[in-house]
Image: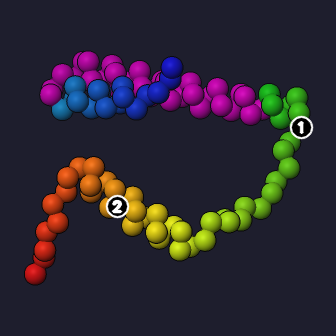
C-alpha cells in the first residue's frame, strides 16, 4: 500500500537523530512514492476520460446549515477534551 506519510515521518526522525544516509534514503523513497501516486492518478483520470468521456460539471451547494457546523465544532472540541482528560484552566 502506498501511504508515504509514515515513511516521511520516519525519514525526518532519522534526519533529526543525525542518521543522514538512512534519513535521506527514506526521504527520497517517500518522494518517489508520491511521484508514482501522482502519475498513477493522472493516468487513471486520462484513461477513464478516454473510455467514458468527460464527466459533466455540477455546481456545489453546501446543504449543511451553519449552526450545525458551529455545534459540531463545539461538540468535537469537548469530546476530544474529555477523551484526553484535559484540565480546564482559568486565565486571568
- Residue 44 lies left or right of residue 14; in this view the side is right
Colour approach in the figure: rainbow
Q: Residue drawn at (31%, 54%), measured in percent from left and top?
A: 80
Separation of residues labelled 1 and 2 (CA atoms): 44 Å
Q: Which residue is mark 2?
A: 77
Instruction: Please tell me which residue lies in front, 24 or 11.
Output: 11
Return the residue found at the far left.
92
Query: Residue 49 in the image: x percent, y percent?
Result: 83, 35
Return the residue found at the far bottom.
92
Q: In the image, is residue 29 above or below residue 85?
A: above
Disc number placed over residue 53 in the picture, else none = 1
- Residue 40 lies left or right of residue 80; in this view the side is right
Instruction: Please tell me which residue lies in front, 60 or 5.
Output: 60
Query: Residue 23 in the image: x percent, y percent?
Result: 27, 23
- As helix, strand or loop, the secondary structure at mark 2 comes to helix
Q: In the image, is residue 91 above or below residue 33?
A: below
> Which segment is the magenta one?
17-46
Q: Residue drawn at (68%, 66%), measured in percent from left and top?
A: 63
Amino acid at each position: 500500500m502506498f501511504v508515504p506519510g509514515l515513511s516521511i515521518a520516519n525519514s525526518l526522525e532519522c534526519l533529526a537523530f543525525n542518521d543522514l544516509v538512512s534519513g535521506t534514503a527514506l526521504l527520497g523513497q517517500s518522494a518517489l512514492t508520491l511521484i508514482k501516486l501522482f502519475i498513477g492518478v493522472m493516468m487513471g483520470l486520462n484513461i477513464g476520460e478516454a473510455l467514458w468521456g468527460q464527466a459533466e460539471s455540477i455546481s456545489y451547494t453546501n446543504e449543511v446549515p451553519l449552526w450545525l457546523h458551529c455545534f459540531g465544532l463545539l461538540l468535537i472540541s469537548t469530546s476530544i477534551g474529555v477523551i484526553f482528560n484535559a484540565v480546564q484552566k482559568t486565565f486571568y
